[in-house]
Image (spheres, rainbow, N blue to C red):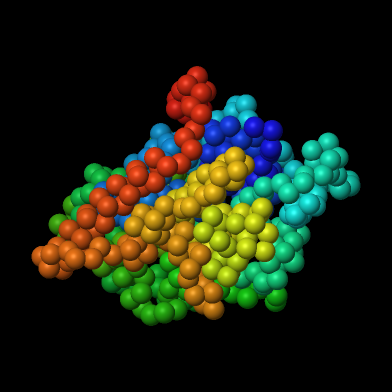
Amino acid sequence: MDQQVIIAGGGLAGSEAAWQLAERGVRVALYEMRPVRTTPAHKTDRLAELVCSNSLKSNAPGSASWLLKEELRRSGSLLLRLADAAAVPGGAALAVDRDRFAEAVTSTLEQHPLVEIRREEFFEIPRCGGFAWQQPADGLAQSLRPQGTPLDRALALIATGPLTSDALARQLQALTGSENLAFYDAISPIVDAETLNMERIFRASRYGKGGEDYLNCPMDERQYGAFYEALRAAQAVEMHCFEDLKYFEACLPIEELARRGVDTLRFGPMKPVGLVDPRTGRQAYAVVQLRAENLRFSSYNLVGFQNHLKFPEQKRIMRMIPGLEKAEFLRFGQIHRNTYINAPKLLGPDLSLRAAPQVLIAGQLSGVEGYVECIATGLLAGMAMAERAKGKAFAPPSRTTALGSLVHYITHADPADYQPANISFDLLAPIDGLPRSIGRDRRARREKQCGRALADLEAWLEGMSAPLGRPSFVGSAQALRLDSL
């Protein structure tokens, strides 16, 4: 196919969209500004770099997160396939080795004959009959692409994520006539495994699910009280005067949780339920969990300990945790800005801008929250653009599916109070007419919803244009490039 689709942003959504388009015979120009220009959150120039946790959340059958992942697998998601291959022990969660995962995504897309990766900053959105401007790698002057020619009504996906550049954000604002919203995500510290005191730590997963995948640091009431008081008194990094602080409720920094009450942490990221210390035979007063960052178990992240404390404060306070007295930090917790549009006001059901239908938005910029949710919007946007490139209409799956319910939320929520969302059963359409015995049983009700969702998804997929399926290339991608990493 002659038309080349533009994708701005090589994160989770952009990478998945590029794969979906290329597998359907559509040429893709994937713009990723790293390493020419980096961000405060990224550490590498790889595509699909996971900058926060290394967990893609629950993989337990029957959960909403599992359902979304299962739908993505059945829809041919590249990133879910690669995540499964790069998995590290994580209990009931799908946790991945972030380096192996990002390298596999990068290698696979680099070798696809229909994907051209351009390591340049994309900072002006193509308009109807207009041009796509781009900052060249040398940063000296503006240039037109491709080769100085206009992109007439080019299809473009903007998936630049939470750290969208100011220049591109201004373009979005000018195009939509709407102010961008901003809030802040915080990331958790990572510690060197060799510096942990294993005599004070025990291995276990909550309720015994997943074996002994987590390291657990138990605290008694006195230790917890001292830790809580230190956290409350800790110094955080100051925000710039122009930054309006709006946290996502599901990803609050621990210092913010501490301000909400003495027991908030103990009923949140430090909850001890389901974790029995084998040395005492009892449940501790509070527990800090550590999850492996890679298959070598050489580093661990502090689960749920995203924060915005000054680095010396983090080292001092985190070393109060039993077992972390001499811990060396490979990464400190940080906080970074997140930007998203008012999707219900601006987007149609195919994720295109109502004001500029040739431009689609996916990933966190559309107002979804979570790795898998970003992959989901990238997959649907890629499918939508592939259909559009072939002159066909696109309709997302129904709201009975996890994929469809996510798109329905971001395009139908109240625009007056739009907040980022993770997948949940609340987003899925309920099943009417269930027997009372099932309707009152949450597990049974959700099993029914999952069964209906997967059946409806299969029916929807039958009506979609299938990937071309170049066996030699798909087969090599399926090997995931992991053996050589």
Which residue corresponds to the image point at 58% horizontal and 32% vertical from the top-left?
Answer: 25
Which residue corresponds to the image point at 84% horizontal and 40% vertical from the top-left?
Answer: 149
Q: Could you tell me residue 247's position as x and y percent?
A: 52, 71
Residue 150, placed above or below residue 356? above
- Residue 146 picture quarter: top right
Which residue corresponds to the image point at 75% horizontal and 55% vertical from the top-left?
Answer: 127
- Residue 390 picture quarter: top right
Q: Which quadrant, please, contains the N terminus?
A: top right
- Residue sitting nearer the eye, 284 or 429: 429
Which residue corresponds to the image point at 56% horizontal and 56% vertical from the top-left?
Answer: 351
- Residue sitting nearer the eye, 306 or 375: 375
Q: Could you tell me residue 478's position as x and y percent?
A: 45, 27
Judge whether residue 346 can be spotted in this image. yes
Q: Could you tell me residue 116's position as x and y percent?
A: 68, 34
Q: How many marks?
A: 0
- Residue 281 picture quarter: bottom left
Judge whether residue 117 can be spotted in this image. no
- Residue sitting nearer the eye, 316 or 346: 346
Q: Could you tell me residue 437's position as x and y percent?
A: 10, 65
Residue 206, placed above or below residue 76? below
Left or right? Give the position of 27 relative to 189: right
Task: Pick out the residue farthest to the top.
Answer: 472
Task: Pick out the residue farthest to the left.
Answer: 437
Left or right? Give the position of 87 relative to 243: left
